[in-house]
Amino acid sequence: MTDPLRLGIAGLGTVGTGVVKIIRQKANLLAARTGRPIEITAVSARSRDKDRDVSLSGYAWEDDPVALATRDDIDVFVELMGGADGPAKAATEAALAAGKDVITANKAMLAIHGQALAELAEDKGHVIRFEAAVAGGIPVVKALTEGLAGNDVTRVMGVMNGTCNYILTRMEDSGLPYEEVFAEADALGYLEADPTLDVGGIDAGHKLSLLAAIAYGTKVDFDGVDLEGIQRISVEDIETAASMGFRIKLLGVAQMTGRGLEQRMSPCLVPADSPLGQLQGGTNMVVLEGDAVGQIVLRGAGAGEGPTASAVMSDVIEIARGTRLTTFGQPAAGLETAVPAKSSTPAQYYIRMVLADKPGAMAKIATVLGDAGISIDRMRQTRHDDTAAPVVFVTHRTSRDNLDTALAAFPGTGVLLGEAVAIRIEDV
Amino acid sequence: MTDPLRLGIAGLGTVGTGVVKIIRQKANLLAARTGRPIEITAVSARSRDKDRDVSLSGYAWEDDPVALATRDDIDVFVELMGGADGPAKAATEAALAAGKDVITANKAMLAIHGQALAELAEDKGHVIRFEAAVAGGIPVVKALTEGLAGNDVTRVMGVMNGTCNYILTRMEDSGLPYEEVFAEADALGYLEADPTLDVGGIDAGHKLSLLAAIAYGTKVDFDGVDLEGIQRISVEDIETAASMGFRIKLLGVAQMTGRGLEQRMSPCLVPADSPLGQLQGGTNMVVLEGDAVGQIVLRGAGAGEGPTASAVMSDVIEIARGTRLTTFGQPAAGLETAVPAKSSTPAQYYIRMVLADKPGAMAKIATVLGDAGISIDRMRQTRHDDTAAPVVFVTHRTSRDNLDTALAAFPGTGVLLGEAVAIRIEDV
């Protein structure tokens, strides 16, 4: 196999530029590792004239990514444009129809259209690879698809949005409220154009849904992800959790339960001294648990030019070496439709509320909890003035249904000031 | 590709038994993930009658692993016997000569004979895979060979012998001396038959040499590994290091320097709050650093039936899927001979010694350090009685040669009681 592998790259932002740099700078290394030259034939991007810190000389230019994707002189279409629909999807479909393999970093597109695209690819014997779509430079798609393929996967967890972890870490370190730290992150350019993708957990939820499909042999089901962002996390919750030995993370969890596939992306308390709890700043971490292997923890940069380009290149090299894997680790046509089981596994919960300082207030709250079948592991009153008593409960393990029953009943007691905050405590 | 993949498994200890269990219990899952049945045709072990907690019914039995390896009705020879030479090597060579692929967990055999075996395999178009040989269940061979293949690897580090990390952790937790904790570990069955393989760093050195070959495109060079075991680590060093914010780990480091390939397996001080520093007990950790990806940390069980069998199965699945990778990530015939550069990178060092309590003692030691070109970052006297003053230095960054010069000159001062202990501080 000494024919060159010819790439067409659509999208020349941070990641695309990084991929071009690696291919230009490491030609010998890549040829040694794959047994053949890796060449860029043509590229496409929105603006031809932008200064990209890398030469594009020698590459044909296409204004239209669909035209790029269907060129006779490319073997692999590398889709780095982003966006669930629009040009990215049109060009990916065109590439597959034209007999190309596809490499993409596009988590949104695969979370929504991954099943259809995988079937389209596999019908024709083509592959779609997407290491860069999940957790940046961490080779987690390969770890799950290949390294843990002899396991029944029991749980997949991950902190997979660096921006959210940066915001939560910065809130803890600075004591500044969410709104101020969000504005800082925005000024630093850390947020997506639509910041809800980050802070609403959508981006991380896309990634989780892709890992769940591989782990459980089910069709990607992003709609089945129980999503909750970090917008409502307060410094008070972060500090209270810290004083009890926890940190708050936007944590994704996927596990197959007796009632179906549970996928959650939501703020959780984790022990501060666990690997997930120790993860500060923009770094990503994925925890894979299998019945044979036990727990595997993977940690690395979740974004940025080099790490994401490294992941794209791992897919390029895989295809150059002649490895042909199915998109989700088994034939897409045989994947089962997931039965969503939202937050069905029981857990301990952290509940914080402010009580009016009047006799019997605590008794009323305790009664609501008891009536909902929730027993209390720990309780603490964090501060106190003449009119308001902030209290925190850590419950024993209970169901989300029981918790929701209690949360719905609290206002009727007439002793709450404001709303109760409840955050799941994940066993990690 | 719906023909079954037929395995011959030699060695039915902990790992072999684990592999048999997975293949028996997960037939449907494995077929879904590979597109074909995975079957065991024949097995071989020293004792046929041992109770193995798994049925061997339906498998042919071979007393001679060479006979097993060359059977017409196997596609892959799975070598789980161990030992650098002897039956493992003979059977592996026979399997390759007979046209079989080989999967092995045998780090010693590959560290010594890996180059010759890889050339033998690749001459004939066969593959040798060895995920289980390094760091148990952690899919680090795949992460390095595939996930980071677009990187120039800048450093590989690892805590890859769980027994040593258990001993060091237990010494810290209990305050018991090395000899007592060693005896405990022995009684618990944690040690190899020849314990020097563990505590002398040999086993971990084997693993490091395999990762270095993949990382740097060099022939496996176990002889080039600068080996130092944990036998001389004292509770005093562990406690002194801890009081300065460090932990002592048996740490493997491989990096390409201007003078050649540096491979070290030796006790090092690492910051207690780093991922490596936080690794307690028998768990393994490998840190991979690449110019594009930055730092990737992988953590998991380094031994045991399930984790090691999981790694073997990842290779079985790889071959069943039709993936054909070279042994060390590029053709063995093209690997360069490593130029060994033992401990050439400069570092800070921890030096502990006991000084006779007489005037001018400290001045003499300081003069030796200065004459060797070593400057002092921190110094502390840990205790003191009428006749002896234990002191600890942390040097600024210096070369191993300078350090050795100073260590050789200390006795001539006439102020040392006993020997000085020097331990490298690794930047992690």
Image (cartoon, coloured by chain):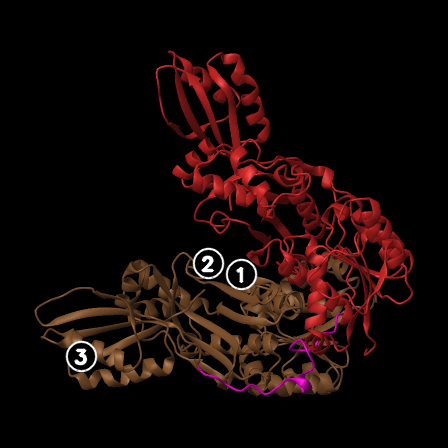
Chain colours: A brown, B red
The residue range painted magenta reads A322-342
Residue drawn where x is 50% and y is 69% of the image:
A157
Q: Chain of mark 3?
A: A
Q: Quadrant of residue B314?
A: bottom right
Instruction: From the top left corner, tell me how far across and down residue B12 is, in percent.
Output: 74, 57
Main structural element of the magenta stretch: helix, strand or loop? Answer: loop
Determine whether, in the image, residue A134 is placed left or right of residue B84: left
Residue denoted by label 3: A364
Give the image location of residue B145, x and y in percent. Answer: 69, 59
Residue A327 included in the magenta stretch of the image: yes
Amino acid at circle 1: Val
Mark 1 vs 2: CB contact within 8 A: yes
Q: Kindly indicate the quadrant of the structure image that contains residue B296.
A: bottom right
Q: Is residue A364 above or below residue B344?
A: below
Does A370 sit left or right of A345 as displayed?
Answer: left
Is disc 1 in the same subunit as disc 3?
yes
Q: Are marks 2 and 3 on the same chain?
A: yes
N-term-proximal mark, 1 vs 2 = 2
Q: Which mark is residue A275?
A: 2
Question: Which residue lies at the image location 65% right of the left edge and 65% below the top edge?
Answer: A147
Q: With respect to residue B186, does A330 lie above or below?
A: below
Q: Which residue is mark 1?
A: A297
